[in-house]
Structure formats: C-alpha cells, structure tokens
Image (cartoon, helix red, strand yellow):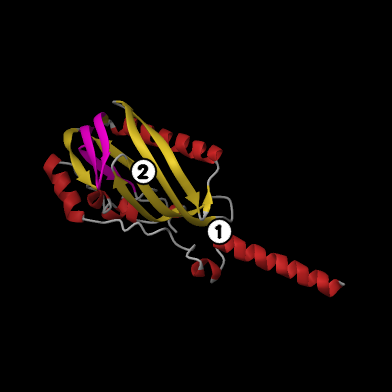
C-alpha cells in the first residue's frame, strides 16, 4: 500500500512539473527549454542604430550620459525642448539600450509596431514569486490630452495562459500611470500620436537632452 501511495505521489508530481513547464509559468531545467518556454517569443524586431542617430541629429536631441546608463532601471533626467513632427521607425526605437539591456525583472524585450496597435514580447521574472516565463501582449495607445495617454491592452499572455481580466486592468492602470508620469516629468506635449505600420508618428515637443544615472546594481541580473 505504501509503495502504491508513493508511486501515485511521484506520478502526480511528475505530471505537475511537466504541466508547469509546458504552460511556461515557471522554469524547469530541460523541460522548459524543450517546450520553448525558457525564452520570449521571437517577433523579429529590427534594429537600426544609424536611423535612431539620424533622427536625433535632425532635431538636435542628445543623450550625453555613458551608453551603459541607458536602461529601463536607470533614473532618467530631461531638459530643454524641441518641436518634432515626424515618424520614427520601429528599427530606430529597437536600437535603444533601454529595450536591449536586461534587468532583474525583464529581458529579451521585443516589439513590433502595426497600424493602430503594437505587440510586445519579453521574458519576465515576477518579483516576490517563483514565477518566470515568456509574456506576450498587444495594445494600442491614444493621446487623450497634450499631457496624457490611455492604453488599451487587447491581449496578454503569460506563457501559454491568458492573463485574467482583473490582472489586465491592473497592468493597464500601472502602465498608464507610468507613461503619464514620465510625460509630465519630461515636459513632453502631444499634438498627435499615431501607431503606423513599422513606425510611430509623433507631433509635439520632445526633450532636447536626456541623461541617465547608472542602473541600480540590484536591478542588474
């Protein structure tokens, strides 16, 4: 009887481990890799640093801090203002170190911009929980005033699981708050903002100089 009980428990644990690794909500050695759940979805994001530098040169936008300071974990500072009326390609944006440098929460960030919406993929470590895996989402962004935007997340998956609606609402609220706080601090004003196939059209004012502090060592993976 004891032997049967132990075999049953081992079987249940084995099924649970396989299920967790297949769903992509936690990392299991070998299995997560075999199921393709140890990495973010490959969106084929392009990167063109020359295009980004040409855009900055056109409008006199500078990023004078050391290159390694520009990460999502770094405190950014903004000064000055320039008028911008232009499109910037996803390839130019894809070359930014903010998106190509991993931190303790996000890595392997990719995005693609389409007509009216964008898709994003990343590998995420959920702080405070033994949960990590690939995340994929689709969203749109709309200017609601010269100083605010709204976000509409139309799809969000963690691993192979659709994220519950209440979690999507929380993510939307947090992302909107972060973006609107940044817009206010940076002195950005928006006359027009459009997601176009492979690019963003922006008309308004943008900071002339963007500096960044070194990232917090605790945020470096």
The crowding category of the residue bearing disc 2, from other C-alpha atoms within 10 Å (few below 14, some 14 to 19, many at least 20), is some
| Helix, strand or loop at mark 2 | loop
- Please report the residue visible at 30 percent of the width from the left and 53 percent of the height from the top: 97
User: At 22% across and 50% down in the image, what residue appears?
Assistant: 92
Of circles 1 and 2, which is in front? 1
Image coords of residue 176 (percent x, y) = 41, 34
- In front here: 119 or 204? 119
Q: Position of residue 64 (x, y in %)?
A: 22, 47
Residue under circle 2? 75
Pinpoint residue 19: horizontal percent, then vertical percent. 61, 62
Q: Earlier in the sequence, mark 1 or mark 2?
A: 1
List the single residue furthest toward the top.
Answer: 145
- Dot 1, how many residues are within 10 Å of its Cα: few (below 14), some (14-19), or many (20+)? some
Percent position of residue 26, x then y: 56, 59
Residue where numbered disc 1 is placed = 23
Side (left or right) of 58 relative to 213:
left
Magenta region, residue range:
190-213
Disc number at residue 6? none
Label the magenta part by its dominant secondary structure.
strand
| Residue 13 occupies quadrant | bottom right
Instruction: Using the image as rendered, state which of residue 121 and residue 126 is in the foreground.
Output: 121
Q: Quadrant of the C terminus?
A: bottom left
- The quarter in which the N terminus is drawn is bottom right
Q: Nearer the viewer, residue 69 or 167?
A: 167
Q: Is residue 146 above or below residue 32?
A: above
């Amino acid at each position: 009887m004891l032997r049967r009980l132990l075999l049953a428990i081992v079987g249940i644990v084995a099924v649970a481990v396989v299920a967790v690794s297949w769903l992509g909500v936690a990392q299991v050695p070998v299995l997560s890799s075999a199921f393709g759940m140890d990495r973010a979805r490959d969106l084929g994001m392009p990167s063109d640093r020359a295009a980004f530098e040409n855009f900055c040169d056109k409008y006199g936008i500078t990023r004078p801090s050391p290159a390694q300071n520009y990460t999502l974990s770094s405190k950014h500072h903004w000064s000055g203002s320039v008028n911008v009326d232009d499109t910037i390609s996803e390839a130019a944006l894809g070359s930014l170190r903010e998106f190509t440098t991993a931190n303790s929460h996000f890595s392997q960030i990719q995005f693609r911009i389409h007509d009216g919406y964008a898709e994003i993929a990343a590998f995420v470590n959920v702080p405070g929980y033994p949960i990590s895996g690939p995340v994929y989402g689709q969203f749109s962004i709309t200017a609601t005033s010269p100083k605010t935007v709204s976000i509409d997340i139309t799809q969000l998956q963690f691993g192979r699981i659709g994220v519950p609606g209440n979690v999507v609402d929380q993510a939307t609220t947090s992302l909107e708050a972060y973006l609107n706080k940044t817009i206010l601090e940076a002195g950005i004003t928006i006359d027009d903002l459009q997601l176009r196939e492979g690019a963003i059209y922006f008309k308004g004012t943008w900071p002339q100089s963007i500096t960044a502090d070194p990232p917090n060592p605790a945020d470096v993976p």
